[in-house]
Amino acid sequence: MKPLVSILIPSYQAEDYLPRCLDSVLAQTYPNLEICLADDGSTDGTAAIARSYAGKAGLPIAVKELPHGGVSAARQQLLEMAQGEYLFFLDSDDYLDPRTIEVLYSIAESHHADVVQCTMKRTTEDHMPPVDCTELGLHIYGNRLQGMAAYFSGSTPMRCMLAAKLYRRRVLTGIRFPYGKIHEDEATIHCILDKAQVTACTTLPLYHYFTNPNSIMKRRFTYQRYDALDIFRSKAEYCWEHGYHFYAKLWSLYYCYTCARLYKATLEEFGPGDLHLPWLAERFRASAGYYTSSGLADPAFTAALRRQAEDMSELTMPGFFDTAHTFFRVTGEDEIRRLDKTKGDDTLMKKLSIIIPVYNNPQELRMTIDSILGSAFPLEDLEVLVCDDGSSADMKAVAQEYAGQISIRYFWQEDRGFRPGQARNMGIRAAEGELCVFLDCGVLVTSGCLAEHWRLYQQQGPKVVTIGYIYGNDLTSDLQEMRDIIDCHSPDEAAALMQERKMLDGRERDYAISEELHRWQAPWLVLWSLHFSVPTDFMRENNIWFDSFFCTWGCEDNDFGIQLSQHGAKYVLARKAKAIHYPAEKRSYDRLQTEPAFRAGWLKNKAYVKEKWADNELVQLWLSEGGGRAIKELPLLPEEGADA
């Protein structure tokens, strides 16, 4: 018997169209089907129609009636209901040619494809004649990268819609649709295709896309259309983090264009007093700044962006596809590359990229940059990347104060909680240095600190993770006394005084176990984000990034360290790479004891790490009761090359 195929139908207010949809499934020539229908709280007769079919159809029909939560919730429910080896999404106002599943399954089997797409044909008719399936018009993408390039390039038949595709079950495992949002296709299809070893398209118009005037995307403009911005930003971030750098730039451009388009639509629908307009203008200017500052835009496009920024009331930018085709070319490999490209995207031009996440702390940023200017390391061999986690203060202006003294660039992301990890990701993506040095804002380096990071990288090789030493982050020293020392002395002098007064690195109690971090079974315990370094290529080539889950304090640096260890990182303690942490008003440790919301965020992060690394015995030990001490008591690993 051929494998079971699950037809997944989300429905909402579809009583006029659902019978036609279901009849088209019942007419399929493929012999082993089930129908799963999730109704999203319809108030018309949709659910009753579905139940009536379940009682009389000649194939299994499962119906789930949900409270109204949007199409994403319905799709998620359908994935849980499906029993098939293959799955196919069908919208309730659309319908299929009788041979749709038969043809797509045949292609999947013949070419070992994980995803097979047919062409959508728009129609206003209730019935269409059967399609002649003699000529399949096949496009086969024989590996994961080809499939992703086919989708991202926009130059092939592969499209973003979830419908009209037959999926092998495994590519949908773990997919989460964005609850409460529209554009759920755009939010997930790249994640699905990235799991497909082989992808195929047929030009046969087997899926009849009915033009329904009441569908979500046909309705009057609402603020829900803003969901597109979150989707396109997350899509660009995904591309950066998974090595699709050309396409990340393209989706960033689409985000920029969408900000301008939504501004105009909001203005026309709600008038000039709408409170969202300044927000959209700010988003546009921030994203446009990437193109005007990175060299991607030529003078004409730069001028167009600036004109748009000056007057957002009219959409004066060239259209997105015109812009993309002007400034990007599709190569024979279907990769979008910038025209007049003078160097490879991954060429590293500096020795060090110093990545500083910031949030409304201009004075601390000045202190950190001033200490870098006092470094013995040649300034021409480094760059500073200021990565803003959504400040309301003008941190860009602070960065620009140093434009003539040091190579410095500024990046901004929207304020959506405590997300310094994702701010650091902006720096990793943009870095032009061989080695990324991570410094928290308010960390001051001594004169020899950066040179020691570089020396250890040269000595220890391309997988070294250097843990810098940091004064001022212990749990007992007087905070005001430390501030007074730092305010009145140079970083070198302050470090010497703090050493003398035992204001030491808070990890000294851990280093007492052994300073040979490469022999620890869990060296990521001491990866604190305040001060460390990692080779840029090591992170990019292994897709190592700070996890986007974390939006409250705690564990994001340990999680990053676990990823590094999983890819064979060698941890090294660098006592000579000395830096100083300018104390905050209150220690994080104290906040855990006195602020319930702060502690709740930390506990949520711990639970996430425990679930994420469920198969990692060391992580599970660490997060068990008493595990913090137990994991430090584990025996050291033998020296490399030593007898077992």
Image (spheres, rainbow, N blue to C red):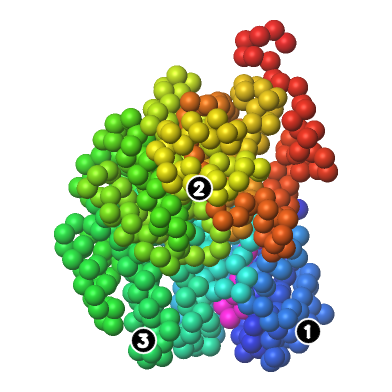
- Location of residue 379 (image quadrant): top left
Q: Please tell me which of labels 3 and 2 falls first in the chain.
A: 3
The image shows residue 241 at horizontal and vertical percentages of 48, 48
Quick check: marks 3 and 2 in contact, CB under 8 Å? Answer: no
Can you give x and y, in whole percent of width and height, for residue 643 in the image?
69, 7
Tally of numbered discs: 3
The question of residue 119 being in magenta is answered with no
Q: Which residue is pictured at 35% across the width and 74% down the height? A: 281
**What residue is at 55 percent from the left and 53 percent from the top?**
584
Nearer the observer: mark 3 or 2; the answer is: 2
Q: Which amino acid does label 2 sit on?
A: Arg
Q: Residue 485 carries which label?
A: none
Does residue 24 appear in this view? no
Marks 3 and 2, how far apart at CA: 49 Å
**Mark 1 or mark 3, whichever is nearer to me:** 3
- The answer to which of marks 1 and 3 sits earlier in the sequence is 1
In the shown orientation, is residue 173 left or right of residue 226?
right
Residues drawn in magenta: 85-95
Spatial CA span between label 1 and label 3: 46 Å
401 versus 617 height, above or below? below
Give the SS element for disc 3.
helix
Image coordinates of residue 10 in percent, x first then y, are: 65, 75
Reading the chain from its start, which is encountered first: label 1 or label 2? 1
Which residue in the structure is indicated by mark 1? 52
Neighbour class for label 2 at 10 Å: few (<14), some, many (≥20)?
A: some
Q: Which three-letter amino acid code belongs to the residue tagged 1?
A: Ser
Q: What is the C-alpha distance between the residues marked 1 and 2?
A: 74 Å
Looking at the picture, tell me which residue is in the foreground, 405 or 136.
405
Q: Is residue 63 above or below residue 451?
A: below
Would you name the residue on which mark 3 appears?
267
The residue that mark 2 highlights is: 483
Viewer-nearest residue: 458 or 537 = 458
